[in-house]
Image (cartoon, grey):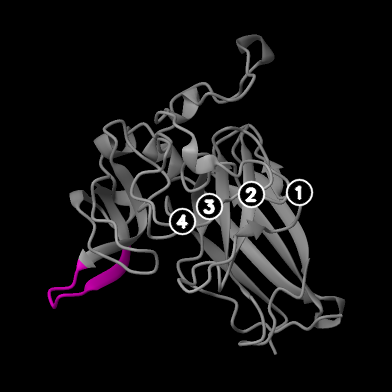
Amino acid sequence: MTQSRTFQLSLTTQGPAYPPSEVMDGNGDFIVIGRINRDNGAGGVSQTWGSAIVSADSPLPKFGEHQPYEIVRELPDHPAQFSPADNEIVLHTLPLPLPCNNYPMVFAPEQCPDAHLVTRPSYPFHQVAVPDLRAQDGPKVTEPVTLGKWAEARGELEVRLVDGGTAAEFACDFSGMLPNSLYTVMSLREHDLDPDGPTRPGPLGVPNAFVTDQDGKGRYRAVLPDPFPAPGTGNRIVNVIVLWMSYQQNYGGAIGWFGLGGDIHAQLKLQGPSFMEFVTTAK
């Protein structure tokens, strides 16, 4: 049985497939770095990792199903090949209610059970209406956040079984992140996207927050009990996702207030379900 392994996290702007992305441009279109839903030419949908500008008016299927995105413009598959104009795109939050969203979960049920009723515009990342913020308090994110800057993010994740295989340690090292910013780390479990009974995504440890330094570097560590029960016996962790928090807030046992681009923005994750080489047991 595997005891430890190191993973390279991939740049992204995407959580689940809907909304297509957790980042928008100034035109109200999604900037998607992740799995792109395309017509496969045989009446179905292909999902391949890539980059594109996607319309917020894309068809919205019921949760668990997929339809081709309405692509406004293709982007190079590799962010290193983005054009100078692409790199200068200023990143925005999604407006509320979230567009093109079919995810049924409430992310902070005790703190904000009626999040779906809140109406807010899309904000440039550097102009988000952080609650109670005053200029005199010294906000640290004051310059436009561009796609080129976002694409500099790098992350390495080491997973190691500990406590006799009853727990696992997750240790992350980051570089190229947005400087002087609050990030959080969430776990995605195999039932979180189950159309027949989704579970609420949760933090990877509590508190699940770290703050990058002035150079965009950061580290994070958490130990979770029995995160990888034997397949078919529990709700295994299958991915780790690093979120930039546009409201610069952390929410205890919830991963966000509004979720999915409203206030959390996936920047790094694994490209697909992972960790099947690990098995843990309960104490």
Q: Residues within 10 Å of mark 2 (few under 14, many from 20)?
A: few
Q: CA distance from mark 2 to mark 3?
A: 32 Å
Q: Which residue in the structure is indicated by mark 4?
A: 15
Q: CA distance from mark 2 to mark 1?
A: 18 Å
Location of residue 167 by image quarter: bottom right
- Disc on res. 109: 2
**Coordinates of residue 45 in the picture (x, y in percent):** 24, 71
Dot 1 amino acid type: Pro
Q: Of the residues under marks 2 and 3, which one precedes in the sequence?
A: 2
Q: CA distance from mark 4 to mark 2?
A: 19 Å
- Disc on res. 185: none
Residue 164 visible in the picture: yes
- Residue interval drawn in magenta: 39-49
Location of residue 31 by image quarter: top left
- Disc on res. 154: 3
Q: Secondary structure at mark 1?
A: loop
Dot 3 amino acid type: Arg
Residue 30 located left or right of residue 131: left
Q: Which residue in the structure is indicated by mark 1?
A: 207
**Coordinates of residue 183 in the picture (x, y in percent):** 62, 43
